[in-house]
Image (cartoon, helix red, strand yellow):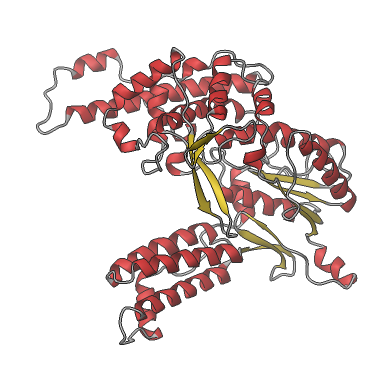
Amino acid sequence: MNGHEKSDSAVVAMKPANKAEQSAAEPVERRAGTEGKASQHNTRRAQDRESVSQALARIRQTARQRKKERFTALFHHLSMAMLRTAFFALKRDAAPGIDGLTWRAYEADLDRRIEDLHGRLHRGAYRALASRRRLIPKPDGRQRPLAIAALEDKIVQRATAAVLNAIYEEDFLGFSYGFRPQRSQHDALDALVVGLTRTKVNYILDADIRSFFDEVSQEWLIRFLEHRIGDKRIIRLIRKWLKAGVLENGSVTISERGTGQGSVISPLLANIYLHYVFDLWAERWRRREATGDMIILRYADDILVGFERRSDAHRFLEVMRERLAAFSLSLHPDKTRLIEFGRFAAVTRAQRGLGKPETFDFLGFTFICGASRQGGFLVKRKTRRDRMSAKLQEIKDELRRRRHWPIPEQGQWLRQVVTGFFAYHAVPTNRAALRAFRHHVTDLWRRSLQRRSQRDRCTWKRMGKLVDAWLPQPRILHPWPQQRFAVKHPRWEPYAGVPHVRICAGGAR
């Protein structure tokens, strides 16, 4: 969750105006041309942010101090200030739900609408609407079903997620990354590289849960929530969203399984479910059962576990299957595999007459066993081939639609696309993939310009001048993982603590 998708981390506390300051400001003559309504809105937003920030801070402190207590009074935190703050945290250009209401239309009469929504919430008159089904293409050619909630459902879900996040961020373990505030994909990538290079990992279990968001048991989810949430009104609210159903082809489907992928609160509910089903169990297994080094990293439903010894890996995988099955989940047979990977993988495989060490994919990168210039072990990351191909296909299709645009406008658009691609993929050891991507974009642009006229003047020499003027040069933008990880986790000690538990990717708790 980035940008406007951030929850409580984006809330900034501001100093409130006291009564003396207010009374002193009243007789001041308003500057000519100043819009009073805009000033009132800005003041109100600042006050809302302050009150919301203070409320969430109190919840965090209580959750930190009382790890095993249940929260029985949370519903009152869904105040008008919280709802208004949640509204401004939503994406402005998000697709509307079945109500057809957009963010801009709701803002036009925001105060009245928020007051009405708040009243319906607290007198029990609020009703969740069914989500609208939308299919989006995946890089592998399949389609991912998304559930687009109505705007008011998004607002209430955002506010509820902010309250629950304040509690569960004190409970979640360090190796859990997906959909958490202050934890990006690159934080997970850094932790993985540090774990692979600083421990005796020789085997990697790359596990993927089959159709996770569709197979979540709603009853188990509610039972997990009730471990910390004792406010029945919050539980009732979550049940409403789970039972609202999905509108597809004119009919509403209600299921006992799943949480709508794409809804605002769904990522948090998924993390809570896997916290109890996998995280706590895996951490306990690592402490009690592992006979060698072991690292764990989970990003949403993508799980990576590193082992020093093959016997630990096989035992863990067998017990993991049983653990997930007990909670209505299963591993994807085609996406779950155990591979030999680590600093000794190349040597041991060569001794057995095998080829190079196997690779695995994670968060858009292919991880490769490599060597540094000094001959030491180096984890190399390269942009996934299918991800690059899918991105180039998108650019090709968009260039076809923009074929007759002026070249400066095309160049400006391509600059934004390439810059965005580099912003994520420009990591150490990936420079060759960046160069290849820029070259392919140049070729696609050249072919598009050639089709504008039968007189072909788009030579490579001319294209060289165009791309130098518009496209950024490939360069590494991210630091080495060890450097950034050490800054974000200054108290991390790789060789301290319990034997065989030397690192907890993401910072041990």
Residue 186 shows in this picture: yes
Residue 282 shows in this picture: no
Q: What residue do we see at 54% from left, 60% from top?
A: 425
Return the x and y of residue 438 as percentages of the image width and height.
Answer: 47, 71
- Please determine whether, in this image, residue 124 is positioned above or below residue 360: above
Q: Is residue 133 left or right of residue 469?
A: right
Farthest-out residue, left: 32
Which quarter of the figure has residue 492?
top right
Q: What residue do we see at 40% from left, 43% from top?
A: 95
- Please determine whether, in this image, residue 180 is positioned above or below residue 238: below
Return the x and y of residue 8 as percentages of the image width and height.
Answer: 48, 31
Q: Nearer the viewer, residue 17 or 83?
A: 83
Q: Nearer the viewer, residue 64 or 383?
A: 383
Where's the C terminus, which quadrant? top right
Return the x and y of residue 295 as percentages of the image width and height.
Answer: 76, 46
Q: What residue do we see at 90% from left, 70% from top?
A: 352
Which quarter of the figure has residue 463?
bottom left
Q: Is residue 192 left or right of residue 38?
A: right
Return the x and y of residue 301 as percentages of the image width and height.
Answer: 66, 44
> So how many labels did they put on this image?
0
Q: What residue do we see at 84% from left, 40% from top?
A: 319
Q: Nearer the viewer, residue 133 or 109?
A: 133
Which quarter of the figure has residue 23?
top left
- Please determine whether, in this image, residue 402 is positioned above or below residue 206: below
Farthest-out residue, front: 250
